[in-house]
């Protein structure tokens, strides 16, 4: 049926690119609008606890930059990013064993833009991206917007299963599809909270090398480990096979939107050109604030403080889950980062249950967002980084009540397995 | 017209007004968009309009700096169920729209259906059941009986709620349990209606003191099988025809039906009724809204435009009417 655009509220509706087809209003977004209210205990968003920052000192940095160096801080700048900041970024990455030159670094608007630029310069519609199962929802959104085909790689409690990676590469290649890169969050993964151990890192790098497969290592949580020294980054052992994405959003402040990509020179050049076409250049003020923060503030002590704070909240969440989750549910026990990945008892669906949760004044992220095909309804991501421990406990208590009510409802309508939740 | 002397006088007479938007229902986002649009329109009409959410800051705000009148634009539970209007009444703050008591009638869809049916309007055959009934009597037996009685397809929706949240069209009986589960995620009572096929229209009713009058009907043609959340709030997903492509008698019938529903439910100032016109010309009442959506994809602003009425001017006049009426 031909539809007359004059009777639609958007006269350009038939002119959008195919990649905009999925950009529609959704009930889930509507529910998250309520999750931001203080009446709701939100275990959904991965918001760093900014209140713990030395905000007065940060304010002084901003004021001094504008008053004293405003002609630079408020001016256009290089698309590759401030040279002094890139030096500081190299020092940050050295904590994870990376030896890099500032010239290899491209500053981006959060690491999300680095991911967007990488996808833009590598992906043609239909190209395959390999990603962990589950994978970061923001990455999946970016891949979808460039019409990539995402193929998930199974994980266990230690991240990507190397044999599964090999098998998947063989299967996809045999099907005549073109794999452009493997996207991984190897440390305190979002959402599954697992970490790839050293042995597997070597295996994954070896597999990628043998198949000439580029690896994107997205590592926003690498310095937020609670129990041990930072994991050695994959990029530390592969200078030309890995593009490393980093961010100050978790270790400093997401509102500044400063991240980066560390890439081999050929890719670096394209990233700079792509960044120029996307934003001309990044915020000079934000970059200089981060640079000044790195040089004038005890930022590593601040990260340590964050880790202590997040560890206490993780413990609060794990304790509350242990006390109140029903049989048949299980969850990860993260050694760092922001999240717990919870599997519901058989037969429950976290996406379908979300309205009930919001009515019960608790929010989480349904697992379906972390799978390109929308599966994963039996999982949910719980975030412990932002609420105080007492709120976390209350949120988990509410969640347990929601799960109990949902279980009863599903039992009523016969949509649970015959023997009920395991 | 802005700058017109009478317009300026009316805005000045009104003084400071407050729009309530937000709330804690799943329709919060829609409500915030409605509230923004009302405030912008009032500002263009020269009215000093502020906005507030329904939270712990509201009562201190209303008591420390009482507005001349309030425009409630909170949708769904808490907004349209009469709760917030009861509080406004307690605080003796005048407000636009139906009283708390009338809201309670209209917001409960099965109750509203019964009221308008008593006033002579047709409404789809339906069954209303709380989730406990399915638990106590056995869902399979109850659902089988519903299908036997009402046939297929069916339309399942929460008895209290809006924006099609938790609602679903069921074409085959096997899909009914899943639709019930989705529905009960939004509320404890479900309304299961026989699906009536026809032209879907939304008819807004305005009463500025000279009696309720229907605005031009808006015909809704969603691109999918029904008017779901995405179809409602994604511009371009739905075709709207204003006025609806109805015959003269059908157009008069839907206008009369909307005014009848408005009157029978005891509503005032403004309302919107959602109706279906069958190919035979029969009009079925589906539900009434006491705080109709005012977003850029909502039908009331479309109807106003088709009628040649100014949105900001209407909001201002409704607030004036509320202020004169008092609490």
Image (spheres, coloured by chain):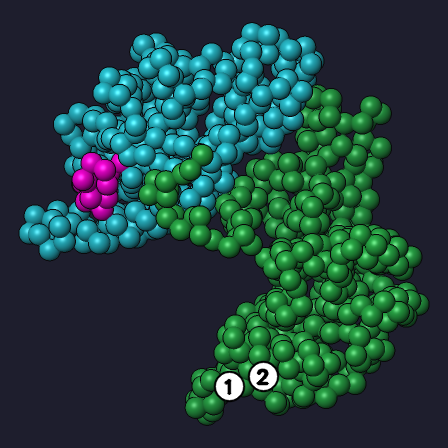
Chain colours: A green, B cyan
Residue at mark 1: A77
Residue B132 visible from this viewpoint? no
Q: Residues within 10 Å of mark 2 (few under 14, many from 20)?
A: many
**Image position of A54 (left or right of B93):** right
Residue range of the region highlighted in magenta in the rendering: B303-317
**Image position of A85 (left or right of A217):** left
Residue A269 on image: x %, y % = 64, 82
Q: Residues within 10 Å of mark 1 (few under 14, many from 20)?
A: some
At 44% from the left and 19% from the top, the residue drawn is: B197
Foreground of the two, B304 or B34: B304
**Image position of A147 (left or right of B80):** right
Foreground of the two, A345 or A242: A242
At 54% from the left and 86% from the top, the residue drawn is: A78
Circle 2: element type:
loop
Residue B308, magenta (yes or no): yes
Residue A203 on image: x %, y % = 91, 67
Please say if the residues under marks 1 and 2 sit with CB atoms less than 8 Å apart: yes
- Tell me: residue B134, above or below residue A86: above
Q: Which mark is residue B153?
A: none
- Tell me: residue A36, above or below residue B267: below
Q: Looking at the picture, do discs 1 and 2 lie on one chain? A: yes
Residue at mark 2: A81
């Amino acid at each position: 049926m031909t539809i007359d655009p004059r009777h639609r509220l958007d006269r350009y509706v038939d002119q959008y690119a195919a990649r905009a087809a999925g950009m529609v209003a959704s009930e889930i977004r509507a529910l998250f609008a309520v999750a931001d209210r203080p009446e709701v205990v939100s275990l959904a968003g991965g918001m760093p606890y900014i209140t713990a920052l030395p905000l007065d000192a940060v304010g002084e940095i901003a004021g001094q930059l504008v008053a004293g160096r405003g002609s630079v801080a408020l001016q256009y700048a290089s698309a590759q990013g401030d040279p002094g900041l890139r030096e500081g970024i190299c020092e940050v990455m050295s904590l994870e064993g990376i030896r890099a030159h500032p010239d290899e670094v491209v500053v981006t608007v959060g690491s999300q833009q680095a991911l967007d630029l990488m996808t833009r310069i590598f992906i043609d519609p239909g190209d395959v991206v390999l990603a962990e199962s589950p994978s970061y929802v923001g990455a999946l959104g970016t891949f979808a917007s460039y019409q990539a085909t995402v193929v998930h790689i199974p994980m266990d409690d230690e991240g990507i299963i190397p044999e599964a990676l090999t098998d998947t590469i063989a299967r996809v290649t045999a099907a005549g599809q073109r794999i452009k890169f493997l996207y991984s969050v190897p440390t305190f993964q979002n959402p599954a909270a697992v970490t790839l151990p050293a042995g597997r890192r070597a295996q994954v790098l070896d597999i990628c090398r043998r198949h000439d497969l580029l690896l994107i290592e997205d590592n926003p949580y690498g310095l937020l480990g609670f129990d041990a020294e930072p994991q050695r980054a994959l990029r530390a052992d592969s200078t030309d096979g890995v593009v490393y994405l980093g961010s100050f959003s978790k270790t400093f402040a997401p509102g500044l939107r400063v991240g980066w990509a560390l890439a081999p020179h050929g890719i670096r050049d394209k990233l700079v050109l792509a960044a120029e076409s996307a934003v001309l250049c990044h915020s000079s003020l934000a970059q200089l604030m981060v640079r000044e923060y790195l040089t004038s503030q005890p930022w590593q002590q601040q990260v340590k403080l964050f880790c202590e704070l997040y560890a206490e909240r993780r413990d609060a969440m794990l304790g509350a889950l242990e006390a109140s989750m029903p049989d048949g549910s299980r969850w990860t026990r993260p050694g760092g980062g922001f999240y717990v990945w919870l599997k519901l008892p058989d037969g429950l669906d976290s996406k379908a249950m979300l309205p009930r949760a919001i009515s019960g004044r608790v929010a989480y992220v349904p697992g379906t967002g972390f799978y390109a095909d929308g599966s994963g309804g039996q999982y949910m991501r719980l975030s412990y980084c932002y609420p105080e421990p007492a709120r976390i406990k209350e949120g988990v208590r509410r969640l347990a009540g929601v799960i109990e009510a949902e279980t009863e409802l599903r039992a009523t309508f016969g949509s649970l397995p015959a023997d009920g939740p395991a | 017209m802005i700058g017109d002397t009478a317009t300026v006088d009316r805005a000045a007479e009104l003084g400071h007004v407050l729009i309530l938007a937000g709330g804690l229902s799943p329709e919060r986002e829609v409500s915030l968009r409605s509230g923004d649009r009302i405030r912008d329109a009032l500002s263009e009409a020269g009215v000093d309009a502020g906005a507030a959410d329904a939270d712990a800051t509201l009562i201190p705000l209303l008591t420390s700096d009482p507005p001349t009148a309030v425009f409630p634009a909170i949708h769904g539970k808490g907004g349209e169920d009469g709760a917030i209007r009861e509080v406004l009444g307690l605080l003796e703050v005048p407000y636009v729209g139906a009283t708390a008591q009338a809201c309670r009638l209209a917001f409960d869809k099965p109750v509203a259906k019964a009221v308008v049916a008593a006033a002579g309007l047709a409404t789809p055959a339906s069954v209303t059941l709380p989730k406990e009934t399915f638990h106590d009597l056995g869902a399979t037996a109850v659902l089988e009986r519903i299908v036997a009685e009402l046939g297929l397809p069916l339309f399942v929706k929460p008895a209290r709620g809006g924006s099609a949240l938790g609602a679903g069209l069921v074409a085959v009986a096997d899909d009914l349990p899943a639709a019930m589960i989705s529905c009960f995620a939004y509320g404890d009572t479900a309304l299961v209606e026989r699906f009536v096929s026809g032209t879907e229209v939304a008819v807004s009713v305005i009463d500025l003191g000279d009696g309720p009058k229907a605005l031009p009907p808006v015909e809704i043609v969603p691109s999918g099988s029904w008017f779901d959340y995405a179809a409602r709030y994604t511009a371009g997903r739905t075709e709207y025809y204003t006025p609806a492509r109805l015959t003269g008698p059908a157009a008069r019938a839907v206008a009369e039906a909307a005014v009848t529903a408005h009157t029978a439910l005891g509503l005032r100032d403004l309302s919107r009724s959602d109706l279906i016109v069958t190919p035979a010309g029969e009009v079925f009442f589906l539900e009434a809204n006491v705080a109709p959506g005012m977003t850029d994809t909502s039908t009331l602003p479309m109807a106003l435009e088709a009628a040649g009425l100014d949105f900001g001017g209407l909001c201002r006049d409704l607030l004036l009417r509320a202020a004169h009426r008092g609490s």
